Image (spheres, grey):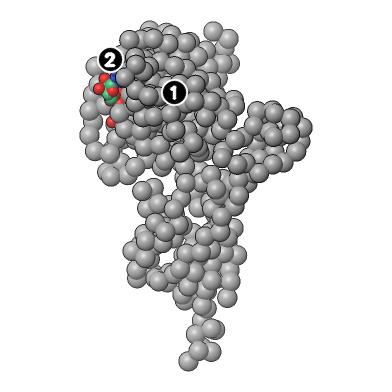
Amino acid sequence: MEIKVGQNILAANDAVAADNRAAFGRSIFAVNLMSSPGAGKTTLLERTIDYLKDRLSLAVIEGDIATSFDADRIRRHGTTAVQINTGGGCHLDAQMVQRALCALDLTDLHLLLIENVGNLVCPAEFDLGEAAKIALVSVTEGDDKPLKYPALFRDARVFLINKIDLLPYTDCDLHRLRSAALSINPGLTVFEVSCRSGAGLQDWFSWLEGETHRWRGRDE
Amino acid sequence: MHELSITESLLKIALAAGEKGGAVRITSIRIVVGDLTQVDPESVQFYLDVLAKGTIAEGALLAAERRPLRAACRDCGREFGVAEFQFVCPHCNSGDTAIVSGRELYIDSIEVEGTEDLACGT
Ligand SMILES: Nc1nc2c(ncn2[C@@H]2O[C@H](COP(=O)(O)OP(=O)(O)OP(=O)(O)O)[C@@H](O)[C@H]2O)c(=O)[nH]1
Ligand SMILES: [Mg+2]
Ligand SMILES: [Zn+2]
């Protein structure tokens, strides 16, 4: 005998993500930063915090399988960081973020930066309640990444290409990398940056600051 | 690897549906997976074999149906099949397109044996 079910498998996650989204409302701009291990997520956040911490009130949620290294790095930049250890899990889910929110003071917070677990596949399937997904790829990973992991690029608002200081030592074709991502998602905003030299970062900072104000209904 | 948490959710939904329908055994679970959804059915089956032990879904087989990736253009209104993840409209070259199918991940139905089926069998 057949029983019709017709239920989204991730419905439970999506319901908690909706709760998170409601908790953020239009007062907190939450971003979900995703990349392969070592592409430079934490370094980007350190740079971003240094620039934005006197301009906005911000906090960080750090997803990691087992350590608190990344949260410790963030705290050294004078920002609140909550560590989530997934205990082997390859991605953050909405419930983990919900628990982390209990440890944060959400009043007067403008911007919440969430570093997902280093992985281009699994995190893309789990809505956390964020306002924007950010995909980050470093040039040393090769220019075929968007087409190998299209779901992340389809859902992202921003594509950050990091480590451009290393371009002379790689065979990465920046144009190919960029156009592959744009064919998957023509609406992507692309930034080419180096968290080492600082090249291109100002444009990213301005975007993030501007979008945070826009989300909160203020034009600067 | 995220197939573990996906299988946990899937099993919870299947068991609830089975129990509500008075099933004593769930023999198969039919899921629909879009071509852009990154879930490996073989890996789900592997976790299902482990997680379903001791439940009415023990030994249940997973049947996965794929859905092709299709998009609709917001400018010219036409629908098209998305080949090689090229989301630009092939008719008018617009980049403003929306996914119509290919991002699915849901349980369509379960195949069960109810109390009556068992009574007939014995
Ligand atoms: N040359 C160069 N190195 C960089 C750049 N950005 C980050 N790195 C280095 O790359 C390494 C990894 O950076 P992280 O910021 O820890 O990367 P991550 O993505 O947070 O890594 P996981 O959290 O482990 O997934 C570090 O040694 C950084 O110093 C860059 O723009 N250029
Ligand atoms: Mg990190
Ligand atoms: Zn069109």
Q: Is residue A110 visible?
A: no
Write down the residue under mark 2.
A77
Number of marks in picture: 2
Q: Label 1 marks which chain's residue?
A: A
| Residue drawn at (59%, 25%) of the image | A187
| Residue drawn at (23%, 31%) of the image | A68
Mark in the foreground, 2 or 1: 1
Side (left or right) of A67 relative to A124? left
| Residue drawn at (47%, 64%) of the image | B62
SS for tag 1? loop
* Front residue of this view, candidates B99 and B81: B81
| Residue drawn at (44%, 23%) of the image | A173
Give the answer, above or below, for where A41 lies relative to A155: above
Crowding at mark 2 (Cα within 10 Å: few <14, some 14-19, many 20+): some
Q: Which amino acid does label 2 sit on?
A: His
Sequence-first tag of 2 and 1: 2
Write down the residue under mark 1.
A173
Q: What residue type is labelled 1?
A: Asp
Quadrant position of residue A101? top left
Quarter of the image where the N terminus of chain A is located: bottom right
Quadrant position of residue A72? top left
Quadrant position of residue A37? top left
Side (left or right) of B55 relative to B76? left
